[in-house]
């Protein structure tokens, strides 16, 4: 148990030591800071709102979600996604999407296998409207540290662009989600991204989520 705790702390330290701006074999690294709030209205309904900012692309996003959990194996969701950036093709860029989510979850003893499927339908875009599908296969390892709950994970995510009829982006990532308090979660992810349009990019996502829960 002690060794596992040391491994987890080492993993977190490595994440925090990653430079948020710089070069890694001439591949740029972008950081996204993602504060948010979640509210568990019941055992089946949850609402999440997340904001995001990246200095690298001068980007801002807003992502409110409504989630329905009929059982421990399935989560259904409807979302709105807003994105604004000053550095796409050298011009200001704005995008509004509606998003449908289907997440399958399979507990396997000490690990959890999760498959997230998302369809983004563009309502408005200052460039060409993009209709895309995202599939993320994630392997999670739950653990307990200092009596708080955490999950270490790895995932692979593919992006399919209906406009072009092809898979154009892939992300491979490693991360850790940890409850600093029962009401506060820190999630740090390091991502290696390859994109057929924009090339390769490394990213760091740092998400801090306030977790509220209705008393039942």
Image (cartoon, rainbow, N blue to C red):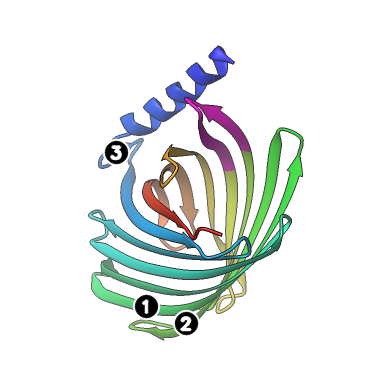
Residue 53 is labelled as: none
- Quarter occupied by residue 164: bottom right
- Quarter occupied by residue 182: top left
Compared to 197, does 94 lie above or below?
Answer: below
Q: Are marks 3 and 1 in contact (CB under 8 Å)?
A: no
Q: What crowding class fits label 1: few (fewer than 14 Cα within 10 Å), some (14-19), or many (20 or more)?
A: some
Residue 146 on the magenta span = yes
Can you name the residue that lies furthest to the front here? Answer: 216
The CA distance from mark 3 to mark 1 is 28 Å
Residue 95 is labelled as: 1
Q: Earlier in the sequence, mark 3 or mark 1?
A: 3
Q: Secondary structure at mark 3?
A: strand
Compared to 145, does 61 lie above or below?
Answer: below
The CA distance from mark 3 to mark 2 is 33 Å
Q: Are marks 1 and 2 in contact (CB under 8 Å)?
A: yes
Q: Quadrant of the N terminus?
A: top right
Return the x and y of residue 157 as percentages of the image width and height.
Answer: 58, 54
Q: Quadrant of the C terminus?
A: bottom right
Q: Earlier in the sequence, mark 1 or mark 2?
A: 1
Q: Which residues are magenta?
A: 141-154
Residue 23 is labelled as: 3
Read off the residue under disc 2. Answer: 122
Residue 189 on the magenta span = no
Q: Main secondary structure of the magenta part?
A: strand
Return the x and y of residue 48 as percentages of the image width and height.
Answer: 45, 64
């Amino acid at each position: 148990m002690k060794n596992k705790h040391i491994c987890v702390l080492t993993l977190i330290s490595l994440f925090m030591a990653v430079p948020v701006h710089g070069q890694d074999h001439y591949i740029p690294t972008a950081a996204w800071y993602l504060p948010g709030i979640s509210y568990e209205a019941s055992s089946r309904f949850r609402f999440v709102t997340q904001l995001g900012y990246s200095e690298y692309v001068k980007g801002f996003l807003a992502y409110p979600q409504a989630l329905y959990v009929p059982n421990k194996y399935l989560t259904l969701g409807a979302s709105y996604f807003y994105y604004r950036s000053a550095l796409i093709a050298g011009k200001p860029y704005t995008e509004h999407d509606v998003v449908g989510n289907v997440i399958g979850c399979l507990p396997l003893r000490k690990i959890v296998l999760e498959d997230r499927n998302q369809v983004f339908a563009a309502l408005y875009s200052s460039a060409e409207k993009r209709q895309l599908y995202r599939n993320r296969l994630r392997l999670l390892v739950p653990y307990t540290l200092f009596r708080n709950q955490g999950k270490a994970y790895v995932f692979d995510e593919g992006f399919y662009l209906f406009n072009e009829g092809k898979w154009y982006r892939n992300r491979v990532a490693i991360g850790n989600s940890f409850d600093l308090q029962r009401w506060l979660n820190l999630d740090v992810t390091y991502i290696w991204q390859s994109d057929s349009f924009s090339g390769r990019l490394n990213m760091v996502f740092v998400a801090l989520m306030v977790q509220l829960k209705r008393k039942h």
